[in-house]
Amino acid sequence: MSSFKNWLMLSARQRKLCKRLEDGRSRLFRMAYAWSHDTDIADEVVQMTMIKAMNHVDKIKDIDALDGWLFRVLSNCFIDICRQKREAIDIDDIILLDNDTPESIHSQNEMLNSVRSAISTLPFKHRQIITLVDIENFSYAEVASIIDIPQGTVMSRLNRARKSLRTLLNEQKKDNEVMTKLEVVR
Amino acid sequence: MSNYNEYSDEHISAYIDGELDNEERAQLLFDEQENPDLAERIYDARILKEKIQLAYSDMSTPQFENKSFSCTAFVHQRFPLVASLALLLIAAAMFVPTLNNNDDLIIAKQLIKNTPVVTASNIDKAIGTNKQVILNIAHYQPEWFSESIDHIEALLIKNKTDKKFNIEIVASSAGLNALDADTSIHAERLNAMAERLDNLKIVACAKSLARLASEGNTIQLLKAITVTPSVAEQVAKRTGDGWLYLKI
């Protein structure tokens, strides 16, 4: 293959990579938000991820592996930023503050608010795995590579996360039913 | 599987996540139709997954605030000087040999367009262990620019003896406001830093200067500030040499 043809191919490939990075930004933000439930932290994490990604765009060999790599960078940046913000707290023990009040849960997006609220109370490692699988539809193998754990651990952790989430949602539902009954009595 | 209760939650999760092979899927599909309890477990698992997807489906990236560019440095009595400078800079930008429209330039333009602005508190972290960094002033907002400059100066002083450590600050378009001796509260400080610190170079974009001057907006540069024909080409050159690109 001529060097000119090589150049043309490389150029098209790199253009494609840049476009993919640009397109991936909103997905990264959504994921960072699902992990942090804080737009400032999500923005900061995406900022760091994009900087790292844009500066290494020419070193990415396999375009198909870009997604997994990007989310791996996102995960590492998220952990770094959280560690800096909460130095004394183990990342796995971070439980986000739940700002939802019963009134806000009864808003028009009641169900979605309940899910977000429940996810925000999960430990980070559960929140991370459930969002990677359910929001981004990553395979178990991809998730294992992104957060650097064995595939078997992905399965068991995901299962525990879903079980906890289901329990939390059921508890919320019961609380809401009690609140509704109390309001009716009043 | 004859006993439906033998299906673990992990197995059902793997089923709804598309992780089972064809044989396992076919078996579970068959059993699901035969057993309402199993069907309910699968339905619950699917609903939970869909709820999570929906809960975050409307999240979108916040847009960075782009401060509209406004240069008010036009001075009527300097019009002949401004016009001459404009012509000189346009000529310089046209005749200085430019890089070919190669990969580096394409990447550089993408970097300039898409790289998010690094906040002052994140500069150290973003630079990390990199020793050669090109910093692009994207917008000049005096209220946070001081903090950014503090971090950069501290890094430069800390690495003063390391000859490999170099920072190049480039400014184009709205970023040129930071270098304007007439209007910027930081112009003197940046000039002093460039004079004092060997590992710092501050560069203004000739194309942007020419364009602004032709519009009647002149940017007064102090003597330690150098001029490059095009910031995009400068970024392409530096990143091609392995420098880290950041936008401040």
Image: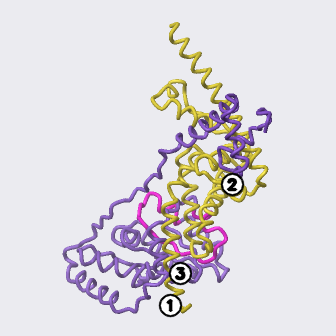
Is there any visible trace of residue B21 in the rendered image?
yes
Q: Give the color of chain B as drawn.
A: purple
Tell whether A58 sits left or right of A157: left
Determine which quarter of the picture holds residue B47. top right
- Label 3 Cα crowd, 10 Å radius (few <14 / some 14-19 / many 20+): some
Colour mapping: by chain
Tell me the element at label 1: helix
The tag on residue A10 is 3
Residue B231 x/y as whole percent: 43, 79
Residues in magenta, as a range: B123-149
Residue sitting at 72 percent across and 47 percent down? Answer: A91
In this view, A174 is above or below B147: above
Residue sitting at 42 percent across and 82 percent down? Answer: B223
Distance between the alpha carbons at the discs numbered 2 and 1: 39 Å
The tag on residue A4 is 1
Asked if the stretch drawn in magenta spans residue B128, the answer is yes
Asked whether B21 or A9 is in front, the reply is B21
- Label 1 Cα crowd, 10 Å radius (few <14 / some 14-19 / many 20+): few
Chain of the residue on which disc 1 is drawn: A
Is the same chain shared between marks 2 and 1? yes
Is there any visible trace of residue B192 in the rendered image?
no
Distance between the alpha carbons at the discs numbered 1 and 3: 10 Å
Q: Are marks 2 and 3 in contact (CB under 8 Å)?
A: no
